[in-house]
Image: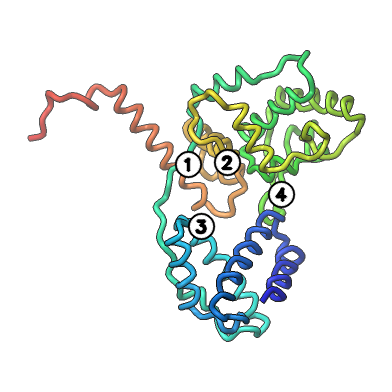
Amino acid sequence: MLQEIAAFETYLKSIRRYSDNTVSTYVRDLNKFVLWANQYGISSWAEVDSSVIQAWFTYLLKNGLVPRSIRRKKATLSSFFKFLLSRELVPANPALTVEAPSTSKKLPNYIQESVLEQIIEDLKPCREDPWDKWRDWLVFVLPIALGLRVSELCSITDKDIDFGREVIIVTGKGNKTREVPIATQLLKQIAYYIALRNKHFNITGGVLLLTDTGKPIYPRWVQRKLKVLLAGYQVGNVHPHMLRHSFATLLLNKGVQLIAIKELLGHSSLAATQIYTHTSVEQIKKVYNQTHPLANNTKIKPS
């Protein structure tokens, strides 16, 4: 069973050109399924039917895995069996008929504009600050300014920055690239950081953001750094994607069209972007209830 997983991994990397993070997630899900299935005497993918997959989902649910993660595992198995079916290694795709637990849509966590303004003011470095203070600033501000995923933030190189056209070329899911405009002032700050970084490490070019030891930053490093930078602020559970959510929500609340936000975020469909309309509606409700004279007028009774 592991041989087929290895072939699928190669297919995802070389043919579908999925990102390393996405491929790792697929492979991890499949390996966990194999470990579970082997306990029940299943030794080939042809032996796996819908009842086996359903039993695994039930096991995962009973052991505390959230429905959203189980639905992701179903998508993994469905893609994998589609791959096996195309190579005539299995008679059918059993994942298609399996019911995964439903999930309720959660509003994305984001930073309120007033809090965001305060954080930006507090974290903004001075010209005399060392290179790593400027690095920390960019780790926070680039996702806010460009709507980046954490993997996109980690992969930006100096060559991706077009200072003349004032855009950054971002490589997203499936190695798809998009151009995101960037403010002139922020470009100047990036250029200043690069000069400090190059002098500190005696380098020229390469990955934009480096750790203290000169290695490219990575998602878990970003997670830890943001927890430190945002400690003490009322922002809820700190995670890198919250900054991307904040970018989208801020633009929507300022009247930017949803289709434009979709392009900036690199979403493949508008459906993925529409969740931010719920956040905007919640903000409108809050403002209405705080400001409109009829919102809390108890004297007016319905007839």
Q: Furthest-front residue in view? A: 39
The answer to whether 78 is drawn above or below residue 237 in the figure is below
**Residue that carries the numbered disc 2 in the rendered image:** 241
**Residue that carries the numbered disc 3 in the rendered image:** 69
**Residue 279 spot, x, y in % from top left:** 43, 38
Which mark is on residue 66?
none
The answer to whether 105 is drawn above or below residue 58 in the figure is above
Amino acid type indicated by mark 2: His
Q: Is residue 176 left or right of residue 33?
A: right
SS at badge 1: loop
- Residues packed near mark 2 inside 10 Å, few (<14), some (14 to 19) or many (20 plus): some
Q: Residue at image x 62%, y 47%?
A: 266
Q: Nearer the viewer, mark 4 or mark 2?
A: 2
The earlier-in-sequence mark between 1 and 3 is 3
Work out how far the residue at label 4 is from the one at label 3, CA to CA, in angstroms.
27 Å
Q: Nearer the viewer, mark 3 or mark 2?
A: 3
Work out how far the residue at label 1 is from the one at label 3, CA to CA, in angstroms.
16 Å
Q: Quadrant of residue 133?
A: top right
Asked if the residues shown at circle 2 and circle 1 are in contact, with their CB atoms under 8 angstroms apart, the answer is yes
Q: Nearer the viewer, mark 1 or mark 3?
A: 3
Amino acid type indicated by mark 4: Thr
The earlier-in-sequence mark between 3 and 2 is 3
The earlier-in-sequence mark between 4 and 1 is 1
Amino acid type indicated by mark 3: Ser
**Residue 91 spot, x, y in % from top left:** 58, 86
Asked if the residues shown at circle 4 and circle 1 are in contact, with their CB atoms under 8 angstroms apart, the answer is no
Work out how far the residue at label 4 is from the one at label 2, CA to CA, in angstroms.
19 Å
**Residue that carries the numbered disc 1 in the rendered image:** 108
Which mark is on residue 177?
4
Asked if the residues shown at circle 4 and circle 3 are in contact, with their CB atoms under 8 angstroms apart, the answer is no
The answer to whether 259 is drawn above or below residue 227 in the figure is below
**Residue 300 spot, x, y in % from top left:** 12, 26
